[in-house]
Image (cartoon, helix red, strand yellow):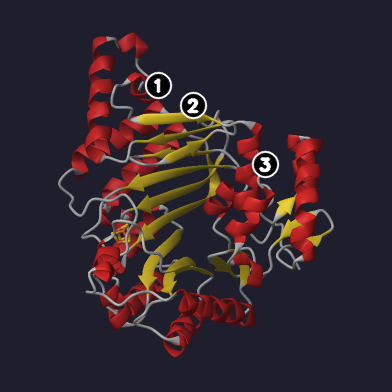
């Protein structure tokens, strides 16, 4: 039975915290392995929250997501202040989902209790594996004992909505160890799991180590094997596979991430954060130095002309030689392609009725026609007006999407 309970999703805010204790070998995200620039960064972040208070056109904010990086490196007071500022400048829904990504190496019971008290109601914890040999291969800073301890603390602190990340396809693991990782996840009875195949990012430390023969190479066959185990065990334990990498108890989807897949507006604050207003996409420069410098220039401009104070950062940034914020207007073909690509990754699939209503018959007919050979080849499935991928087909979502692109 397909679950459409999240069909209606409202606006969200993403806050990027670009600091980590150290760099994990496989990391492809923008983050700095030092907190040296944290204070200056927080000032700029607050200025951007205020400067972009009208971006969502007064729409109710239903999700707030602190991602990174490692947001759990911020103090409780720093997170509380950011939440307070968002609440002042945006209409935040009473039952908004407020997620914080956390790494075990920065968690304690006291800190988790504090997070719960200040209003964080969902945790996404980067466990990655419950086995030390995997964690060492990934150069994570925590060990398996601490990972388990953090889950106990999170529950003790009052969190019910907890997600963990696990990585599969590791050359240090095997089918038995991966099954054991999943056993532990099920034993903790958590409502959400994000599981990713290990990807070798260009220029990551791990990629270089493998090229130099200093780390074990990755085998794609093992990732495919682990993915099959994952899908099977998740279904067996009553979890809904609602996106390629995401599994949940019914109704416990990440509302925030679902808003990306449903094309609803979101505002991204902080270096490298992306925003979408329904017609265009903006993204901030992936550099804390350039981001904070632009913010300082905005502040100086504001002081010299108080009449023309906010919103300043986006406009100032657009004209700035260093291009601290980029903007792209989306053509209908791009909107269609993005819709196809994002929705095929999900359990909800492509809604042909929506395509016809929102984008016109040209796109819905094009999509349906191009879907027929894929359905005949068993690479795509159809139920009434929905085109979607089954568990087995999902690993090849990108290839299928390309064949439906306009
Ligand atoms: S904690 Fe996450 S963001 Fe930070 S270095 Fe590791 S993988 Fe990258």
In the displayed structure image, the side of residue 117 where residue 187 appears, left or right: right
Q: Residue at x 60, y 58 (%)?
A: 399
Q: CA distance from mark 2 to mark 1?
A: 8 Å
Q: Residue furthest bottom?
A: 176
Tell me the SS state at disc 2: loop
For disc 2, the marked residue is 54
- Residues marked 2 and 3 touching at CB (< 8 Å): no
Q: Is residue 18 above or below residue 377?
A: above
Which comes before the other along the chain, label 3 or label 1? 1
Q: Residue at x 24, y 11 (%)?
A: 304
For disc 1, the marked residue is 311
Q: CA distance from mark 3 to mark 1?
A: 36 Å
In x, y percent, where is residue 120? Answer: 42, 55
In x, y percent, where is residue 250? Answer: 64, 67
Q: Which mark is residue 406?
A: 3
Which comes before the other along the chain, label 2 or label 1? 2
Residue 246 location, quadrant: bottom right
Q: Residue at x 75, y 39 (%)?
A: 363
Tell me the SS state at disc 1: loop
- Residues marked 2 and 1 touching at CB (< 8 Å): yes
């Amino acid at each position: 039975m397909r679950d459409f309970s999240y069909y209606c999703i409202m606006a969200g805010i993403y806050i990027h915290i670009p600091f980590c204790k150290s760099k994990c070998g496989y990391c492809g995200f923008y983050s700095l392995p030092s907190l040296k620039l944290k204070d200056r960064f927080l000032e700029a972040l607050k200025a951007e929250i205020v400067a972009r208070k009208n971006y969502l056109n007064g729409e109710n904010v239903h999700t707030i997501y602190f991602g990174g990086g490692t947001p759990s490196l911020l103090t409780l007071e720093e997170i509380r202040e950011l939440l307070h500022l968002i609440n002042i400048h945006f209409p935040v829904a009473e039952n908004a989902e407020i997620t914080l990504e956390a790494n075990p190496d920065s968690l304690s019971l006291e800190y988790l209790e504090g997070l719960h008290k200040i209003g964080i109601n969902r945790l996404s914890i980067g466990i990655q594996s419950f086995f030390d040999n995997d964690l060492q291969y990934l150069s994570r800073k925590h060990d398996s004992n601490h990972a388990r301890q953090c889950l106990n603390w999170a529950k003790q602190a009052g969190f019910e909505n907890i997600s963990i990340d696990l990585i599969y396809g590791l050359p240090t693991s095997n089918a038995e160890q991966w099954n054991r990782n999943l056993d532990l996840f099920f034993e903790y009875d958590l409502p959400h799991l994000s599981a990713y195949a290990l990807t070798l990012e260009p220029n990551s430390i791990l990629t270089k180590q493998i090229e130099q023969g200093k780390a074990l190479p990755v085998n794609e066959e093992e990732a495919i094997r682990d993915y099959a185990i994952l899908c099977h065990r998740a279904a067996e334990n009553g979890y809904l596979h609602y996106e390629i990498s995401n599994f949940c108890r019914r109704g416990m989807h990440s509302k925030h991430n679902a808003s990306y897949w449903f094309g609803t507006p979101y505002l991204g604050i902080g270096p490298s954060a992306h925003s979408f207003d329904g017609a265009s996409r903006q993204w901030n420069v992936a550099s804390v130095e350039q981001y904070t410098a632009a913010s300082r220039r905005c502040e100086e401009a504001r002081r010299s002309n108080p009449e023309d104070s906010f919103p300043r950062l986006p406009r100032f940034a657009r004209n700035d030689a260093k291009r601290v914020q980029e903007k792209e207007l989306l053509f209908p073909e791009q909107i269609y392609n993005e819709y196809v690509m994002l929705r095929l990754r999900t359990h909800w699939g492509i809604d042909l009725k929506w395509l016809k209503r929102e984008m016109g018959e040209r796109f819905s007919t094009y999509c349906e026609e191009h879907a027929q050979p894929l359905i005949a080849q068993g690479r795509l499935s159809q139920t009434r007006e929905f085109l979607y991928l089954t568990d087995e087909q999902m690993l090849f979502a990108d290839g299928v999407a390309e064949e439906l692109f306009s």
